């Protein structure tokens, strides 16, 4: 797992609400294997990072959103019938902190836009509620395709942080 998300910051900023890059307090990143067990690793990475950033009180909401974003990337961007190497790290989790905002972003190789299911479908389905949960637990979320040498897309969620007293 890496600790430098700086290569992701510039393209990610393009799809976010205005954030002063000079106010960034930290960013970390980790590659995730193309297996559903990666969701557990993403949650552990998130817990460790939020603890280091003294944001443990936000863990429950942030971890739920991270879990949903990673699960969606694994389920929809890396379908089971896609041939890959066992150590393929096509999905990457990025956590970025500013003084008043925290962003969780998941990069995957697909250009397909994330789509939330309609409400009536959600009632009967056991799955398909991921983006509804992301929307419910974060302050805002979005996605954008990656440009240049990077391929795929980034789906991100933003959390407002309370100012320190």
Image (cartoon, helix red, strand yellow):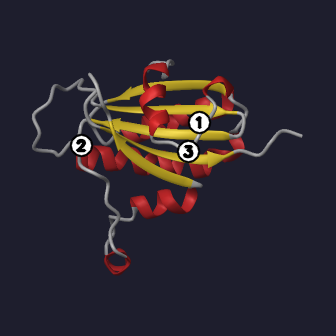
Q: Where is residue 143 drawn, in percent x and y?
A: 39, 47
Look at 48% across and 56% down and name the residue there.
134
Q: CA distance from mark 1 to mark 2?
A: 29 Å
Q: Does the residue at mark 1 contact the one at mark 3 (Cβ under 8 Å)?
A: no
- In the image, taking residue 35 as reference, residue 69 lies left or right, namely right
Q: Where is residue 160 drawn, in percent x and y?
A: 67, 48
**What kind of element bears circle 2?**
loop
- The first of marks 2 and 3 along the sequence is 3
Which disc is residue 17 wearing? 3
Q: Tell which tag, 2 or 3, sits nearer the viewer.
A: 3
Look at 33% across and 64% down and name the residue there.
128
Q: Tell which tag, 1 or 2, sits nearer the viewer.
A: 2
**What kind of element bears circle 1?**
helix
Q: Where is residue 16 drawn, in percent x and y?
A: 51, 42
Q: Which residue is mark 2?
A: 111
**What kind of element bears circle 3?**
loop
Closest to the observer, 136 or 50: 136
């Amino acid at each position: 797992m890496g600790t430098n998300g700086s290569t992701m910051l510039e393209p990610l900023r393009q799809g976010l609400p205005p954030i002063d890059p000079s106010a960034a307090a930290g960013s970390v990143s980790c590659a995730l294997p193309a297996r559903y067990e990666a969701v557990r690793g993403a949650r552990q990475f998130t817990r460790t990072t939020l603890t280091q950033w003294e944001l443990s009180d936000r863990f429950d909401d942030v971890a739920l959103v991270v879990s949903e974003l990673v699960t969606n990337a694994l389920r929809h961007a890396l379908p089971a019938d896609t041939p890959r190497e066992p150590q393929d790290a096509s999905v990457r989790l990025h956590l970025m902190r500013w003084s008043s905002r925290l962003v969780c972003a998941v990069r995957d190789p697909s250009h397909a836009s994330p789509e939330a299911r309609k409400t009536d479908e959600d009632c009967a389905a056991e799955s398909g509620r991921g983006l509804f949960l992301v929307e419910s637990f974060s302050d805002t979320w979005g996605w954008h395709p990656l440009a240049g040498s990077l391929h795929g897309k980034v789906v991100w969620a933003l959390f407002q942080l309370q100012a320190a007293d």
